[in-house]
Image: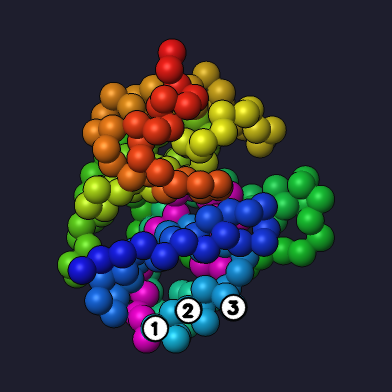
Amino acid sequence: MSHIQKFTNKLLDTNTYLYIQNDKCILIDPGSDFEEIMAFIQSNQLTILSIIATHGHFDHVASVSKFQKEFKCTFYLHKKDSKTLKLSNFLMKIFGYKKQIEIPLVDNYFEGEEGIIVIQDFNINYFNFPGHTSGSCIFKIDNNIFTGDTLLYSIDESKVPNENLDELKLSQKRIFEKFDENVFFWPGHGNFGLLKELKNINFKN
């Protein structure tokens, strides 16, 4: 039986998720709070099989390298976000942060508009929905979608460099067309819920 554990990191309140089946898990968007996440993993005797990131912004990949070293696990990112990942510390500086993160090495790239990867008993469908970044992805595992910063409860415009708001709005519209309204969505920031709840609140038009 599978379940999802959510962590909200101190850096930009970014959400990190563990998708857990028995004693194995997939780590999604590991943010800044490595110690807290690691403590949960150890106390529950879990093993990380792979790390996947919805996009390459620093707050979503801050502790990837630490988990790679700890578990010898692979890291997946969409190829279109390789440059975004490499600019993580530059973007942190723009946001006013003096600390830096260790830029992780990408073991495998997602490519194209969509596809599937199989990691032991985990079937992970990925979909490239550009706008927030060119390589932003949504992951579907069972009846759950992990939307990163492409779809949040809030639709306030962000001020992230190189974000294409027209493209983002088109991607958001496509999400509601593609996925069943009763799927659970798990965003990169804020609360989770049913996709139909989000549509009723912010996307009536």
- Relative side of 95 to 41, left or right: right
Magenta stretch, residue numbers: 45-64
Residue 6 location (% of width, % of height): 46, 61
Q: Measure how far apart labels 1 and 2 are at the Cα level.
A: 6 Å
CB contact under 8 Å: marks 3 and 1: no
Q: Which residue is mark 1?
A: 44
Q: Position of residue 50 (x, y in %)?
A: 35, 68
Q: Answer left or right for 188 relative to 5.
A: right
Q: Residue at position x 40%, y 27% from top? A: 199
Could you tell me if residue 202 is visible in this image?
A: yes
61 inside magenta stretch: yes
Q: Identify the colour scheme used.
A: rainbow
Q: Mark 2 — residue?
A: 40
Say which residue appears at 63% left-offset and 54% top-offset: 13
| Residue under the image location 40 percent in, 44 percent down | 193
Of the numbered discs 3 and 1, the one sitting upstream in the chain is 3
Describe the element under mark 2 as helix, strand or loop: helix
Q: Tag 2 or tag 3, which sits nearer the N-term?
A: 3
C-beta proximity under 8 Å, tags 1 and 2: yes
- Residue ID for mark 3: 35
**Residue type, numbered disc 2:** Phe
Give the number of the mark in front: 3 or 1. Answer: 1
What separation in Å lies between label 3 and label 1 (alpha carbons)? 14 Å
Q: Amino acid at mark 1?
A: Asn
Q: Quadrant of the C terminus?
A: top left
